[in-house]
Image: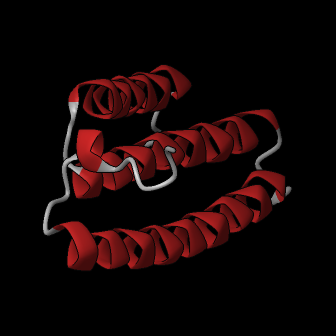
Amino acid sequence: MEIKLEYCLLLAAALFCIGVYGLVTSRNAVRVLMSIELLLNAVNINLLSFSNFLDPGAIRGQVFSLFVIAIAASEAAVGLAIILAIYRNRETTDMEQFNLLKW
């Protein structure tokens, strides 16, 4: 049974909308990072879906998806390190409290 392109695009659109909603409404820094991961996973689903739909023999979408996964992993590691450093100084993960670079 083959999954249709429309179903994959609907799933990716739903994940992207959930990620944007979490990014806009969240005040917690860890939740913001999780929302960014949802956005990147929606992009990965789109890359894989279009790659499979347009040229099933080629692996172009899978290669780009691996690059996105690598960038997402490094973003998560650096983001969590920054959040832990700020939490040690401020004892909060509230995004409105992150004003360390302001004068």
**Which of 94 and 43 lies nearest the eye of the viewer?**
94
Q: Is residue 76 left or right of residue 57?
A: left
**Which of 50 and 94 lies nearest the eye of the viewer?**
94
| x 42%, y 53%: residue | 37
Q: Is residue 63 left or right of residue 88?
A: right
Location of residue 93 with respect to 24 vertically, above or below: below
Give the residue at the far front of this rendering.
103
Location of residue 9 with respect to 45 vertically, above or below: above
| x 79%, y 34%: residue | 54
| x 25%, y 46%: residue | 97
The answer to which quarter of the image holds residue 27 is: top left
- Residue 3, position as x, y percentages in the image: 45, 37
Location of residue 99 with respect to 91 vertically, above or below: above
The answer to which quarter of the image holds residue 74 is: bottom right
- Residue 7, position as x, y percentages in the image: 41, 26
- Residue 64, position as x, y percentages in the image: 77, 57
- Residue 43, position as x, y percentages in the image: 58, 40
**Which of 35 and 66 lies nearest the eye of the viewer?**
35
The colour mode here is: secondary structure
- Locate the N terminus and report the quarter of the image it occupies: top left
